[in-house]
Image: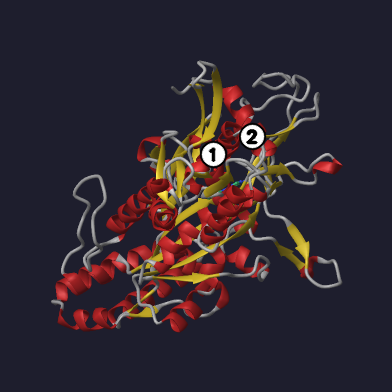
C-alpha cells in the first residue's frame, strides 16, 4: 500500500534520498555550495548515462533519418547574434529596495522573501525597482586579452550548433530532407532565481533534435496536396505528403511514447499547446510536455515547429547558403499547371517576405530577397523548416525520481510493520540492474557462488555486491536506490536442502517483492530481457 505524503515534505524526502544515497550533491558543498549548480554522485551519474543513452539510441541508432552531433560549448559569438540570443535572451529582473532580494518579475508572487524565509510565497512588500532585462548568457573571454572583441558565450542551448553545422552534417551523412540532427550536451543560463532543486539550474544538459522538413509549398508541388491531421494521437509512419503540422504531431507523440518507455506514463504528463500570443514570433506551434512535480506542474520538454527561421538567420548573417536542392521538387514543379505554380510561388514569397520583415530587413530588400527565394523554389531549392523537440536531462532525471519515489508499509513474517522506501525506476534506466548477495559472508561456498554470479553478469549490466547485514536490510538498501532485481546465493544453491535445487538462486523482484527460484544458467537471459 502506498502512503500519501504531503507534497512539500515529499520534495524534502526526495532531496534527502538523493543526497543520502549518492544521486545528487550540492556543487562545491564543502565551501557552502554555489547556487544553481549540482553534482551527480555515483548513482546519479549512472542514471544520467542511462537516460541519455536511451534517448540517443532511440533518436539516432534505431532510425535511418537522424544523424548525431557533438559540438563545442563555446562558439563564434556571431552565432548568438544571428539567433537573437544576444538581443533578446533575457528575463525581466527586479530588485526589492527593502530586503535587497532579486527576483524575476514574472515570478514575484511565487518566491519567498529572504526576510520571511518561512514557507511564505510573497515578498516583503518593500518598494521594487522597475523590471530590467537581464541577459541569461554567461560571458567569457577567449584568448589572453579581456576586451569586447574577445567576448564569447557559454551556449545557452545546444540547438544553435546544429544549425551552424547543418551543411556539414548534410553533406557528410548523405541524408536528404526530411532528416534530423540530434545532440546531447551542456547548456548554461545565468538564471535569476535558480530553484526547485535541479529543476532550474544554471548549468544543465539538454537533449535536442532538429528535424528538417520541406516547406509545405514543396510538399504540395511534389505530392499534390499536404495531408492534414485527422485527430489526436500518433499519425503513424511518415508519408511524403506530410507538412509541418503532421510532422509536429508525429514528434509530440514520439516523445510521449519515449517517456512511457523509460517509466513516465502518458498520465504523468500534461500536453500544453501554447496559445498564439505565447508563441515565439517565428514559431507556428509549440507543445510543452509538462510533468506533475511535487512543487507544481512544470515543463519537461518543448516541441516547437520553428519554421525556417533559424537556418534563414544563419544564411543571412554568415553569407553561407543554407538551402538544399530537392530533385523531386524540381521535377514536380516542371509538371505543375501555371495556376498551381503561381499560387505556390506566391504563398512561399509571402512567407519569406514575412520572415525578412520580422528580422528587420528593409521592405525593398526584403521584397527582392523573397522574390529570389520564390524563383529558387521553382528550381528545386529551399531552406528547410524545422521541428525541434528539446528536452532537459536534469529535469527529466528529477521527474523520473519523483515519479518513482514511494513509501510503503510492509509487514514481515513476525507481524512487524515498517516503512519501505523504494524507487520504482524502470529497469532500463535503473542505475544498478541487479544486486548479488551471499546469504552469509562467513560461508566460503556461498561467497564463491555469489562472486561467480557477479562476474558472470558484470560484463552485461551494472551489478552491486553486498554481504553485510541481514538479508532484509540488504533488500531495503537496494529498494531505495531502485535496483529491480536481487539475487541471493543460499543453502539451496549448494544443494544442501534438496539436491535438485543445486545451482539455483533466489531472485527477488523490487516492486512486488515476489521471490522465485531460478537456475544460475537462466539468470542472464532472464534479466537481459527485462532491462533492455
Ligand atoms: P523555462 O520556461 O522553464 O525557463 P524554457 O522554455 O526556457 O524553460 P527551453 O529554452 O525550451 O526552456 O529549453 C528546453 C529544455 O531545456 C526545457 O524544457 C528544460 O527541460 C531544459 N531547461 C531549460 N532551462 C533549464 C534550466 N535552467 N535548468 C534545467 N533545465 C533547463
Residue 471 image-quadrant placement = top right
Mark 1 = which residue?
A: 401
Residue 26 image-quadrant placement = top right
**Between 96 and 207, which is closer to the camera in this rendering?**
207
Q: Secondary structure at mark 1?
A: helix
Dot 1: within a 10 Å radius of its alpha carbon, few (fewer than 14), some, or many (20 or more) residues? many
Q: Secondary structure at mark 2?
A: helix
Q: Point out the tag, 1 or 2, that comes first from the N-terminus.
A: 2
Instruction: Give the image location of residue 124, x and y in percent.
Output: 73, 20
Direction from residue 229 to residue 316 in the image, left or right? right
Dot 2: within a 10 Å radius of its alpha carbon, few (fewer than 14), some, or many (20 or more) residues? some
**Between 196 and 366, which is closer to the camera in this rendering?**
196
Q: Is residue 57 visible?
A: yes
* Residue shown at the point (24%, 69%) measured from the top left: 219
* Residue shown at the point (51%, 53%) measured from the top left: 51
Q: Compared to 161, does 485 lie above or below?
A: above
Quarter holding the N terminus?
A: top left
Answer yes or no: do the residues labelled 1 and 2 have beta carbons within 8 Å?
yes
Direction from residue 191 to residue 239 in the image, left or right? left
**Between 254 and 280, which is closer to the camera in this rendering?**
254
Q: CA distance from mark 1 to mark 2?
A: 10 Å
* Residue shown at the point (56%, 72%) measured from the top left: 317
Q: Is residue 206 visible?
A: no
Q: Compared to 122, does 208 lie above or below?
A: below
Instruction: Give the image location of residue 65, x and y in percent.
Output: 36, 71
**Between 190 and 430, which is closer to the camera in this rendering?**
430
Instruction: Give the image location of residue 270, x and y in percent.
Output: 40, 37
Mark 2 = which residue?
A: 17
Amino acid at each position: 500500500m502506498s502512503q500519501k505524503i504531503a507534497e512539500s515534505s515529499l520534495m524534502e524526502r526526495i532531496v534527502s534520498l538523493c543526497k543520502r544515497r549518492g544521486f545528487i550533491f550540492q556543487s562545491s558543498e564543502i565551501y557552502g555550495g554555489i547556487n544553481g549548480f549540482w553534482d551527480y554522485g555515483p548513482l546519479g551519474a549512472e542514471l544520467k548515462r542511462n537516460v541519455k543513452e536511451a534517448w540517443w539510441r532511440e533518436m539516432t541508432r534505431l532510425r535511418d533519418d537522424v544523424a548525431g552531433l557533438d559540438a563545442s560549448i563555446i562558439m563564434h559569438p556571431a552565432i548568438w547574434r544571428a539567433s537573437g540570443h544576444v538581443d533578446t535572451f533575457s528575463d525581466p529582473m527586479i530588485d526589492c529596495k527593502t530586503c535587497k532580494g532579486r527576483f524575476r518579475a514574472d515570478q514575484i508572487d511565487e518566491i519567498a522573501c529572504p526576510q520571511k524565509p518561512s514557507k511564505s510565497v510573497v515578498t516583503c512588500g518593500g518598494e521594487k525597482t522597475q523590471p530590467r532585462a537581464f541577459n541569461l548568457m554567461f560571458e567569457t573571454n577567449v584568448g589572453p586579452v579581456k576586451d569586447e572583441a574577445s567576448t564569447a558565450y557559454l551556449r545557452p542551448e545546444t540547438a544553435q550548433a546544429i544549425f551552424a553545422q547543418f551543411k556539414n552534417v548534410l553533406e557528410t551523412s548523405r541524408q536528404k530532407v526530411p532528416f534530423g540532427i540530434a545532440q546531447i550536451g551542456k547548456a548554461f543560463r545565468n538564471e535569476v532565481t535558480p530553484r526547485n532543486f535541479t529543476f532550474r539550474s544554471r548549468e544543465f544538459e539538454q537533449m535536442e533534435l532538429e528535424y528538417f522538413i520541406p516547406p509545405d509549398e514543396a510538399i504540395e508541388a511534389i505530392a499534390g496536396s499536404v495531408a492534414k491531421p485527422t485527430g489526436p494521437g500518433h499519425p503513424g509512419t511518415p508519408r511524403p505528403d506530410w507538412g509541418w503540422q503532421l510532422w509536429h504531431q508525429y514528434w509530440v507523440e514520439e516523445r510521449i511514447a519515449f517517456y512511457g518507455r523509460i517509466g513516465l506514463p502518458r498520465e504523468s504528463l500534461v500536453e500544453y499547446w501554447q496559445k498564439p500570443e505565447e508563441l515565439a514570433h517565428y514559431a507556428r506551434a509549440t507543445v510543452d510536455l509538462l510533468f506533475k512535480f511535487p512543487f507544481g506542474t512544470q515543463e519537461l520538454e518543448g516541441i516547437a515547429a520553428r519554421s525556417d527561421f533559424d537556418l534563414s538567420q544563419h544564411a543571412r548573417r554568415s553569407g553561407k547558403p543554407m538551402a538544399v536542392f530537392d530533385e523531386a521538387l524540381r521535377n514536380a514543379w516542371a509538371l505543375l499547371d501555371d495556376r498551381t505554380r503561381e499560387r505556390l510561388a506566391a504563398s512561399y514569397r509571402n512567407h519569406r517576405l514575412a520572415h525578412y520583415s520580422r528580422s528587420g530587413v528593409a521592405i525593398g530588400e526584403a521584397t527582392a530577397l523573397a522574390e529570389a527565394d520564390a524563383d529558387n523554389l521553382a528550381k528545386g531549392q529551399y531552406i528547410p523548416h524545422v521541428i525541434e523537440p528539446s528536452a532537459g536531462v536534469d529535469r527529466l532525471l528529477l521527474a523520473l525520481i519523483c515519479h518513482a519515489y514511494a513509501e510503503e508499509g510492509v509487514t514481515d513474517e513476525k507481524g512487524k510493520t515498517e516503512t519501505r522506501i523504494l524507487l520504482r525506476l524502470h529497469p532500463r534506466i535503473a542505475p544498478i540492474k541487479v544486486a548479488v548477495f551471499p546469504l552469509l559472508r562467513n560461508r566460503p561456498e556461498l561467497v564463491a557462488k555469489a562472486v561467480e554470479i557477479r562476474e558472470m553478469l558484470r560484463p552485461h549490466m551494472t551489478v552491486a555486491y553486498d554481504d553485510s547485514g541481514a538479508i532484509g536490510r540488504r533488500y531495503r538498501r537496494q529498494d531505495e536506490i531502485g535496483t529491480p532485481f536481487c539475487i541471493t546465493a543460499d543453502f539451496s544453491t549448494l544443494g544442501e536442502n534438496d539436491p535438485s535445487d543445486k545451482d539455483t538462486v533466489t531472485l527477488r523482484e523490487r516492486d512486488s517483492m515476489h521471490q522465485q527460484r531460478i537456475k544460475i544458467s537462466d539468470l542472464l537471459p532472464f534479466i537481459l530481457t527485462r532491462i533492455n
